[in-house]
Structure formats: C-alpha cells, structure tokens
Image (cartoon, grey):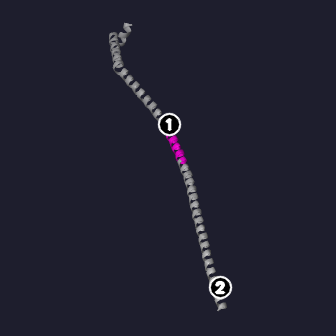
C-alpha cells in the first residue's frame, strides 16, 4: 500500500498530520463556535416563543377586557334606564299629588266663593225685604194719609 501511495505522491504522515489538524480545528470550532451559536439560537427561539405566548395572552386579555367593558356598559345602561324609569314614576306620582292638591284647593275656593255668594244673596234678599217692607209701610202711610186727610 505504501507503494501505491508513493506512486501517487501521497505522504501518509502528512495526511495523518492534516487529519489531526482537521480534528483540532473541528473540536475548536465545535467548542468555540457551534455551541455558542446553538445556545444563542436556543435563547432566541425561547424569546420568540415567549413573545408569541405573551401576544396570545395579551390578545385573550384584550378580548376578556372588551367583554368586561361591554358587560359594564350594559349594566350601566340598565341602571340608567332603571333610574330614568324611577324618576318618571316619581314625577308622575308627584304630578298626580300636585293635581289633587290643586283640585282640592280649587274646590275649597269654589266652595268658599259659593258660600260667600249664598251669604251675599241672603243678605241682599234680607236688605231687599227690609226695603220692600219700608216701601210698603211708606206706601201704606201715604194711602192712609190720603184716605184720612
């Protein structure tokens, strides 16, 4: 085999030395280059995976927050409607009470006015009866004076 290598000009000791040099370079590259690059890629892969996970979590939280906001708006709307309804009912009750009071006052004023009108009419009737009686007495006196004079 040595003759074959010698025929082609291959030096076996040189090939072994190159193989040892290649192994040393391969080990050095493995240790100083491949492992750090592999570690860096692993870290980056973890960072990217965490970023995706965080983005997914943020998206879920946003959807949940939107749902919560919608629930709160709905609850506030319901509460506002209830308050407006209660205010309208209170206003209607107050209106009815004020109308009853006004009606009662109007009836009292009307009754008082009727009583005063009745009293005034009775007074006017009494006064007119007195006047009629006086006129009748004066007429009777005049007639009697004329008859006896």
26 on left or right of 117: left
- Kindly identify which residue carries mark 1: 64
66 on left or right of 130: left
| 142, 100: nearer the viewer | 142
Q: Earlier in the sequence, mark 2 or mark 1?
A: 1
Residue positioned most to the right = 147
26 on left or right of 137: left
Q: Is residue 105 magenta?
A: no
Q: Is residue 92 above or below residue 11?
A: below
Classify the position of the C terminus by image quarter: bottom right
Q: Residue at x 44, y 32 (%)?
A: 54
Residue 113 location, x and y as percent?
58, 67
Q: Is residue 128 above or below residue 144?
A: above
Identify the disc placed on residue 140.
2
Magenta segment boundaries in residue numbering:
65-82
Q: Quadrant of residue 139?
A: bottom right
Q: Is residue 78 magenta?
A: yes
Q: Residue at x 53, y 51 (%)?
A: 87
- Would you say residue 130 is visible in this rendering? yes
Q: Is residue 78 above or below residue 59?
A: below
Q: Quadrant of residue 118?
A: bottom right
């Amino acid at each position: 085999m040595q003759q074959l290598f010698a025929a082609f000009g291959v030096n076996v000791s040189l090939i072994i030395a190159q193989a040892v040099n290649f192994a040393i370079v391969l080990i050095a590259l493995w240790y100083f280059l491949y492992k750090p690059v592999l570690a860096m890629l692993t870290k980056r892969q973890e960072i990217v995976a965490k970023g995706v996970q965080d983005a997914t979590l943020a998206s879920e939280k946003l959807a949940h927050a939107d749902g919560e906001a919608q629930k709160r708006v709905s609850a506030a709307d319901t509460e506002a409607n209830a308050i407006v309804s209660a205010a309208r009912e209170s206003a209607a009750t107050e209106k009815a009470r004020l109308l009853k009071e006004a009606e009662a006052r109007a009836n009292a004023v009307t009754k008082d006015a009727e009583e005063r009108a009745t009293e005034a009419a009775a007074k006017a009737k009494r006064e007119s009866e007195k006047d009629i009686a006086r006129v009748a007495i004066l007429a009777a006196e005049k007639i009697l004076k004329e008859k006896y004079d």
